[in-house]
């Protein structure tokens, strides 16, 4: 957690405990510093297991053109767990029950993890 956000939460908790918390206090949550940008990483795993091999991927930079960036043909990580260890946060887990891939060979595309990172 960002230090500024942690400090804001601590201050709000202190004011809440003292009975002094206001709507203005809650509306004052710090935002992402101007120098940071969000990256979105789609990792298509071969199963819902975080340790499974990666079958496909795409990286989106919020400040770049609309197309995803593939700096190389090799996935940036060997697994979702490896990406998490590198500081990526999972914002969506796959929902395999939503996909019926019984008639295709590339069923791994159904296991889409969406991750984010601010840099």
Image (cartoon, grey):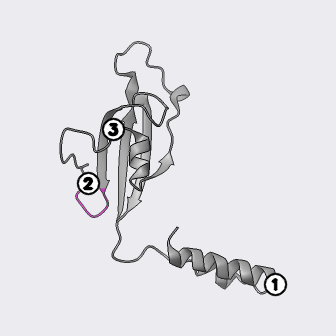
Choose between 6 and 37: the one closer to the eye.
6
Mark 1 or 3, closer to the camera: 3
Q: Is residue 41 above or below residue 110?
A: below
Q: Earlier in the sequence, mark 2 or mark 3?
A: 2
17 vs 86, left or right, is right
Q: Residue 119: which quarter of the image?
A: bottom left
Q: Are marks 2 and 3 in contact (CB under 8 Å)?
A: no
Q: Secondary structure at mark 1?
A: loop
Label 1, label 2: how many angstroms apart (C-alpha)?
A: 47 Å
What residue did someone put label 2 on?
66
What residue did someone put label 3 on?
78
Residue at 43% over, 37% down: 112
Q: Which residues are magenta?
A: 61-66
Label 2, label 3: how many angstroms apart (C-alpha)?
A: 25 Å
Q: Earlier in the sequence, mark 1 or mark 2?
A: 1
Looking at the picture, how far across and down is residue 55, in whole percent? 32, 31
What residue did someone put label 1 on?
19
């Amino acid at each position: 957690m960002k230090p500024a956000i942690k400090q804001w939460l601590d201050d709000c908790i202190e004011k809440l405990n003292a009975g002094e918390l206001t709507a203005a206090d809650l509306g004052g949550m710090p935002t992402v510093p101007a120098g940071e940008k969000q990256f979105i990483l789609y990792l298509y795993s071969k199963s819902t297991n975080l340790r499974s091999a990666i079958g496909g991927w795409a990286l989106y930079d919020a400040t770049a053109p609309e197309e995803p960036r593939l700096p190389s043909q090799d996935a940036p990580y060997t697994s979702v767990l490896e990406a998490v260890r590198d500081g990526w946060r999972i914002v969506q887990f796959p929902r395999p029950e939503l996909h019926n891939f019984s008639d295709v060979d590339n069923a791994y595309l159904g296991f889409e993890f969406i991750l984010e990172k601010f840099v």
